[in-house]
Image: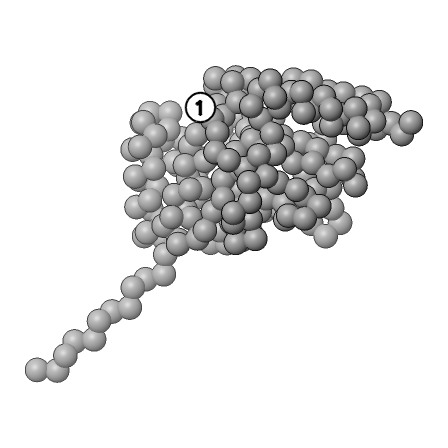
Amino acid sequence: MDTQTLPPIGRGMVLEDVDWKTYSRLLKAFEEASGHSSDLRPRSVGNHAPARTRHRRAVPRRIIIALTEELGLPILCGGSTTLRRQLHQRGIESDECYWIANEPRMRGRRALNLQRDPPPDLAVEVDVTNSSLDRLDIYATLGVPEIWRLENDVLGFLALQPDGTYKESSHSLSFPRLTAADLAPFLEMRLRADSNTVIRAFREWVRNNLMPPKPKRKRKPN
């Protein structure tokens, strides 16, 4: 029997020396018990995540949605969809994941099959704890091009490189004019203001800084 280190079911369980068939059965049982799966229908954030982590996910999620709305981009929110590829014997449950550039290819899908479908364009990792598993390596194997990682209230953008590793990037791949430094004031603002106030301020910032200026109307000659 082939053996390999397999990813966590949720955040708290790591299975080692388990073949893929057994892993798939255990994952299915966990999905049935928790309501989490590769199903792409909207659902609430898993109750197994700590309350602080669920709260910290909320602002990045709303920022990403606001960006696509303001910039006129399509989006499919995958939530905590389980991403897995039997061919590579790897799988992971992201905190949040999104299809943006590849949303048209995913439109109408009810379930994710990475043998057929593109991986998410963007995944979000919040409060990553030390683990024997390299979550970035799993994301790289699955081909996720961009990760936003929020640790200790500091947000970083990671871009997948041709050699299969992630490298810190100043600009987002999904939103090329956006930098991680641009988001820092809004992540700090959420500590002293409610989420709606933060997102209203962020939308105003996007309109003033990321959207192309409107052409000036020519004055008609008198």
Q: Residue at x 89, y 29 (%)?
A: 2
Q: Residue at x 52, y 47 (%)?
A: 108
Report whether residue 76 is seen. yes
- On the rendered structure, is 150 left or right of 206? right
Q: Residues within 10 Å of mark 1 (few under 14, many from 20)?
A: few
Report whether residue 148 is seen. no
Q: Residue 28 in the image: state x and y as whole percent.
A: 67, 25
Q: Which residue is mark 1?
A: 55
Q: Residue 60 in the image: state x and y as whole percent.
A: 46, 35
Q: Total number of numbered labels?
A: 1
Observer-nearest of 5 and 85: 85
Q: Is residue 212 above or below residue 204?
A: below
- On the rendered structure, is 163 left or right of 2? left
Extreme residue toward the bottom, this view = 221
Q: Residue at x 52, y 22 (%)?
A: 46
Q: Is residue 84 above or below residue 74?
A: above
Observer-nearest of 19 and 50: 19
Q: Can you say which quadrant of the picture contains the C terminus?
A: bottom left
Per the image, label 1 sits on a secondary structure element best described as: helix
Q: Amino acid at mark 1?
A: His
- On the rendered structure, is 27 left or right of 154? right
Q: Is residue 106 above or below residue 4?
A: below
Residue 137 picture quarter: top right
Q: Residue at x 72, y 52 (%)?
A: 162
Q: Can you say which quadrant of the picture contains the N terminus?
A: top right
Extreme residue toward the left, this view = 222
How was this image coloured?
A: one colour
Q: Residue 203 in the image: state x and y as whole percent.
A: 33, 44
- On the rendered structure, is 200 left or right of 132? left
